Amino acid sequence: MGPVSQAAQRPEPAGGRRAELDAVRRVVRRLAVLSGAVVLAAVVAAAAAVALVFQRADGAATADQLRQTAARSADPSEVPMGTYVVVRDADGRLRSTPDLPAGLPDTAALASVAAGGPPREADVDLDEEGSGRSRSYVVRTERQGDLVVQAVVDRTQAEEVGERLLTSLAVAVAIGAVLAALGAALVARRAAAPLVSTIELQRRFVADASHELRTPLTLISTRAQLLARRLRRQEVDLATTRDVDGLVRDVGVLSGILDDLLLAARPAGERAGERVDLAPVVEGVVDAARPHAATLGVHLVLRGADPGACVVDGVPSALRRAVLALVDGAVDHATSRVDVVLEGSGRHAVVRVVDDGPGLPPEPAERQRLFARFHQARPSRPGGPGGTGTADGARPHHGIGLALVAEVVDAHGGEVHAGERPDGGAGASFELRLPLAR
């Protein structure tokens, strides 16, 4: 049986639904955190702006009170409630507002300014007699002609108002944080609803495609192979035999393309797998590719690591498809030789596929596009594929092989690189790096 005979219908992975839900939950959490952070930042910024405006307005009001109080130096007894004035004349005599708080005036400041010093302003905390409470005052001392005037403003009430405002803002921010979290979670869930529908449609597509396409392909492949065997036992012209053999090959190629498409369409969570020893995987790929390489006159050489030396966490079928895509591409582009090397490098397993074909495009941007879907930038080998069933046995390429390799490697936490041959000769080198299992 050909490659298609192995394409029996596969049940959908049991963890597929769970993987999809986990992916959606991660998206919802990220959206919720991001939305909540934005709303909370806006609430905090608004609260900070209110606090700043209040602080500046309060400071301006205090400065205005000090100026107005100091202007009443002619009659210290006639000042508004909560303000006090102390006046020192040229002879050192003091006049002050009645009921001046204990601890005032600030005689040191009066003496300093009287001696020619600059105006002084200070915040003073004094204990209120009989109540045990502390009251806050702003004291400004300045010279007005022959007089030294000390204006005092009681800041206790204003500070209490400021504390109540800050407490209210803190409560508002806390409530805003809770509401932001709830609202962000609700918005994220609604925003993720289309994503859930899309993932569900993709899951159904993979399941339906697996059932609807694999079964007919298996039947076509089986009938084509039976027809080819029957024709070989009969005397049929060579052209007919070649056409039937080409049909078998083309069905195999179509089956491979279907496998690639279905694997690339699966959510990444479904690809989490088991411990995989790359040695038998790579050896199996090379053994399977040798007949095709022989028809093209290409010598396929394997230099592999010992079994157990390159063990990774992954899905065996996905890793096999990725390595097969690299080897198939190298064989179809090589002139005479392809080297496949498996080795350990630090904490990574490395699969390197080197051919002696026409090489890679010189432009870096074009090399990056090698891993884009349905993009073909490498020139084919001489006499290369020109369609299905070519005379030289080369397989047609449909531009998804390297894209699949990149997606499989990314899902396994690895990297894939394309570059020149390590020895500097003509050709190309593709290197697949996967983290070793811990």
Image (cartoon, rainbow, N blue to C red):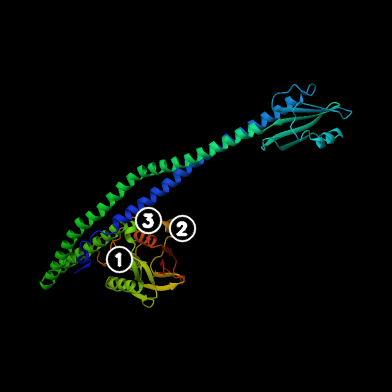
The amino acid beneath tag 3 is Ala
Q: Is mark 1 on a helix, strand or loop?
A: helix
Taking the view exactly as shown, the residue that stands out farthest to the left is 234
Label disc, if present, on residue 372 of the rendered structure: 3
Count up the numbered dots: 3
Write down the quadrant of residue 61 in the picture: top right
| Residue shown at 35% from the left, 45% from the top | 192
> Reading the chain from its start, which is encountered first: label 3 or label 2?
2
Estimate the spatial distance between the alpha carbons at disc 1 and disc 3, rounded to whole Å. Answer: 21 Å
Q: Is residue 30 above or below residue 155?
A: below
Mark 1: few/some/many CA within 10 Å (<14, 14-19, 20+): few
The amino acid beneath tag 2 is Pro
Which residue carries the number 1 mark? 317
Residue 433 percent coordinates (x, y): 42, 66
> Reading the chain from its start, which is encountered first: label 2 or label 1?
1
Q: In this view, does 176 lie above or below 431?
A: above
Asked whether 435 or 148 is in front, the reply is 148
Label disc, if present, on residue 249 of the rendered structure: none
Taking the view exactly as shown, the residue that stands out farthest to the front is 130
The amino acid beneath tag 1 is Ser
| Residue shown at 11% from the left, 73% from the top | 233
Q: Is residue 27 above or below residue 362?
A: above
- On the picture, is 395 further left or further right than 158? left
Which residue carries the number 2 mark? 364
